[in-house]
Image (cartoon, helix red, strand yellow):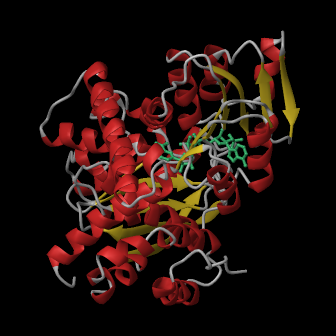
C-alpha cells in the first residue's frame, strides 16, 4: 500500500510516483523519501533550478546498489546462506559512510531507507562524508562467537572490493558492534595486505578506534534533546525520561540523561519493557544487556524494589516529559504518540532511525511537542565516526574528553543549523523542516557544483 503523498508539493509529486514505481514493495524507503520530499516545496520555491537540474530525482536513485550471497558454515557443519547488501547512495560530500545492520528483517528497501536518511544526516554534521548503508538478513541472536566470525569473514570476502578509505567506509548498526567490526577488519586486512584503519569505523580503541564512538549516538541524542529544551528556556534536569531499546544507542542515552540530572524511568527490548520508579540502575542494565546479553526481564528480577517487567507492552505507556525512541524504525505510532501527549510529554528526540511513524510525528507537531528527527538528533554517531577517520588519517588518537567536546560542539552546530534554517523559511521550531532543508540544500549545491555525474 503506497503511503499518502498529499503532503508533497504538487511540483514534486511526479518524483514520488517514480520512486513508488521503481521501488515496488519497499515501504520503508517510500516513507523516508516522502518525509524529505514533504519539506522541499518551500526550498524549490526559492531555488527553482533544483527542479530544472533534476537534483531531487538524481538523489532518489542510489549511485550504486550491491547485493551478494554470503555462504558460511555453522557450528554443526551445516552450510548457511544469507543475503548481503551495500547501497552506495551519494558520494558528493565524501566517501560513502554509514553502518552495516545484521538483522533477519533486513531487505534491500531497509538498506535504501537507511542510506537515503544517511545522506542528509551526514551533510548536517558539516564533515566530509557521503551517504551509504549496508547489512545482511543474518540473525546474530544465539550464534556462537565462531559463527559470528565466519559470517563476518564471508561477508567481507565479497564486500572488500567495494570499500576503501576514500571510497566507502562502513561502521556498525543494529547487530554490529566492536566484535563484528573486528572480524570484518581482520578479513579486510588479510585480503588486501593493508592496515587501512580508515576503511571501517567503530573499531576497538587498541586497534585504531576512537574514544567515545561507542557512546556517541546516545550521548549526541541527549545533547540534542537538551539543546531543544534550552531553546525554549528549559533543560533535561529533573525531568522523567523514557528510552526505548536497551542496545548501544539506548544505554548511552540513559547514561547521558543521568549525567545531566534527568531520571530514566523505563527502557525496553523486543520482549517487553521495564519500569523503575527509582530510576534505571545503569550498571545492572549494562551487565544484563552488554555483558550477559540476557533479556530485559532479568533486570527487573535482579533489581527488585519498585521495578517491574511488562511483557509485550508498549514502553510509551509510561508517563514522562521526555521520550527518546532508540530501538528501531516505526516503533512509536500515532496511538503511542497520543498517549505520550496525554501524559504531558514535552520533548521527543529520535535516537533510532525513523522510529516515529508519520502519524506520530503529526500528533507531536500538531500538539506543540518539540520533535527532533533522527537525521539531526542521532547524527552524533556518524559524526564521531568521521572523527575516527580523521584520527586514522593523521595516525593520531585523541582523549575521551577532547572527542566528547567535539561531539558536543557538532550536536550544538546541527541544532543551530536546524533552528536557523526553519526560522529563515518562516517555520520556527520546525526541526523536521529545518533538518531536511539544511541537509538537502548542502547536498544539492554540491551536486550542482560537480556537474551531471
Ligand atoms: P542495538 O544495539 O542492536 O539495539 C537495538 C535495541 O532495540 C535492542 O535493545 C533491541 O532489543 C531493541 N529493539 C529492537 N526492536 C524492538 C522493538 N520492536 N521494540 C522494542 N525494542 C526493540 O542497535 P543500536 O545500535 O542501538 O541501534 C538502534 C537504532 O539506532 C537503530 O535504528 C539504528 O539504525 C539507530 N542508529 C544507531 C547508531 C549507532 O551508532 N549504533 C547511529 C545512528 C542511528 P532486542 O535485543 O530484543 O532485539
Looking at the rendered image, the quarter that the N terminus falls into is: bottom right
Residue at 37% x, 28% y: name it.
212
| 362 or 398, nearer to the observer | 362
Left or right: residue 183 compared with residue 9: left
Foreground of the two, 312 or 142: 312
Identify which residue, 240 or 216, lies in the foreground: 240
Q: Is residue 77 visible?
A: no
Q: Quadrant of the C terminus?
A: bottom left
Using the image, determine if residue 279 lies above or below residue 107.
above
Q: Quadrant of residue 119 in the image?
A: bottom left
Depicted 91 relative to depicted 353: above or below:
below
Query: Is residue 273 in sight in this rendering?
Result: yes
The picture places residue 267, in percent across and down from the top left corner, at: 70, 31
Disc tally is 0
Q: Is residue 94 found left or right of 331 in the rendered image?
A: left
Where 314 sits versus 407, above or below? below
Left or right side of 34 for 380: left
Residue drawn at 15 percent across, 74 percent down: 449
Can you tell which quarter of the image residue 181 is in?
top left
x then y, percent, for residue 110: 57, 66
Residue 163: x, y in percent? 29, 61
In the rendered image, residue 339, in percent from the top left (x then y), is placed at 80, 43
Residue at the far front: name it. 426
- At x 86%, y 42%, the residue is 312
| Residue 168 shown left or right of residue 84 in the figure | left
In what quadrant does ligand 1 lie? top right
Please state which of residues 151 and 181 is positioned toward the viewer in this rendering: 181
Amino acid at each position: 500500500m503506497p503511503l499518502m503523498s498529499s503532503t508533497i508539493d504538487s511540483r514534486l509529486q511526479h518524483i514520488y510516483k517514480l520512486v513508488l514505481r521503481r521501488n515496488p514493495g519497499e515501504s520503508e524507503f517510500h516513507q523516508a523519501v516522502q518525509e524529505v520530499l514533504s519539506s522541499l516545496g518551500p526550498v524549490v520555491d526559492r531555488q527553482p533550478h533544483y527542479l530544472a537540474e533534476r537534483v531531487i530525482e538524481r538523489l532518489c536513485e542510489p549511485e550504486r546498489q550491491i547485493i551478494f550471497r554470503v555462504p558460511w558454515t555453522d557450528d554443526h557443519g551445516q552450510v548457511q546462506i544469507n543475503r548481503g547488501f551495500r547501497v552506495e547512495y551519494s558520494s558528493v560530500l565524501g566517501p560513502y559512510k554509514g553502518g552495516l545492520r545484521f538483522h533477519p528483517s533486513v531487505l534491500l528497501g531497509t538498506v535504501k531507507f537507511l542510506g537515503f536518511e544517511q545522506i542528509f544526516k551526514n551533510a548536517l554534521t558539516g564533515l566530509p562524508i557521503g551517504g551509504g548503508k549496508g547489512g545482511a538478513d543474518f540473525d546474530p541472536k544465539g550464534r556462537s562467537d565462531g559463527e559470528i566470525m565466519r559470517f563476518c569473514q564471508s561477508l567481507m570476502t565479497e564486500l572488500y572490493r567495494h570499500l576503501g578509505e576514500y571510497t566507502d567506509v562502513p561502521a556498525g548498526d543494529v547487530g554490529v558492534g566492536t566484535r563484528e567490526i573486528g572480524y570484518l577488519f581482520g578479513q579486510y586486512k588479510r585480503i588486501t595486505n593493508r592496515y587501512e584503519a580508515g576503511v571501517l569505523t567503530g573499531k576497538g580503541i587498541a586497534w585504531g578506534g576512537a574514544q567515545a564512538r561507542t557512546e556517541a549516538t546516545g550521548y549526541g541524542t541527549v545533547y540534542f534533546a537538551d539543546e531543544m529544551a534550552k531553546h525554549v528556556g528549559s533543560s533535561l534536569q529533573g525531568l522523567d525520561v523514557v528510552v526505548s531499546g536497551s542496545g548501544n544507542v539506548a544505554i548511552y542515552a540513559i547514561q547521558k540523561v543521568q549525567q545531566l540530572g534527568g531520571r530514566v524511568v523505563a527502557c525496553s527490548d523486543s520482549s517487553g519493557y521495564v519500569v523503575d520508579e527509582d530510576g534505571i540502575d545503569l550498571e545492572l542494565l549494562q551487565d544484563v544487556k552488554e555483558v550477559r546479553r540476557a533479556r530485559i526481564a532479568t533486570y527487573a528480577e535482579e533489581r527488585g524494589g519498585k521495578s517491574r517487567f511488562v511483557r509485550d507492552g508498549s514502553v510509551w505507556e509510561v508517563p514522562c516529559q521526555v521520550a527518546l525512541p532508540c530501538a528501531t524504525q516505526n516503533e512509536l505510532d500515532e496511538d503511542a504518540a497520543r498517549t505520550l501527549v496525554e501524559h504531558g510529554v514535552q520533548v521527543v528526540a529520535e535516537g533510532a532511525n525513523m522510529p516515529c511513524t508519520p502519524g506520530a510525528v503529526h500528533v507531536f507537531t500538531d500538539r506543540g511537542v518539540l520533535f527532533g528527527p533522527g537525521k539531526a538528533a542521532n547524527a552524533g554517531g556518524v559524526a564521531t565516526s568521521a572523527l575516527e577517520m580523521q584520527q586514522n588519517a593523521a595516525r593520531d588518537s585523541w582523549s575521551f574528553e577532547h572527542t566528547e567536546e567535539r561531539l558536543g560542539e557538532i550536536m550544538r552546530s546541527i541544532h543551530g543549523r536546524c533552528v536557523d534554517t526553519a526560522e529563515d523559511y518562516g517555520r520556527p521550531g520546525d526541526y523536521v523542516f529545518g533538518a531536511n532543508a539544511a541537509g538537502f540544500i548542502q547536498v544539492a549545491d554540491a551536486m550542482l557544483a560537480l556537474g551531471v555525474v
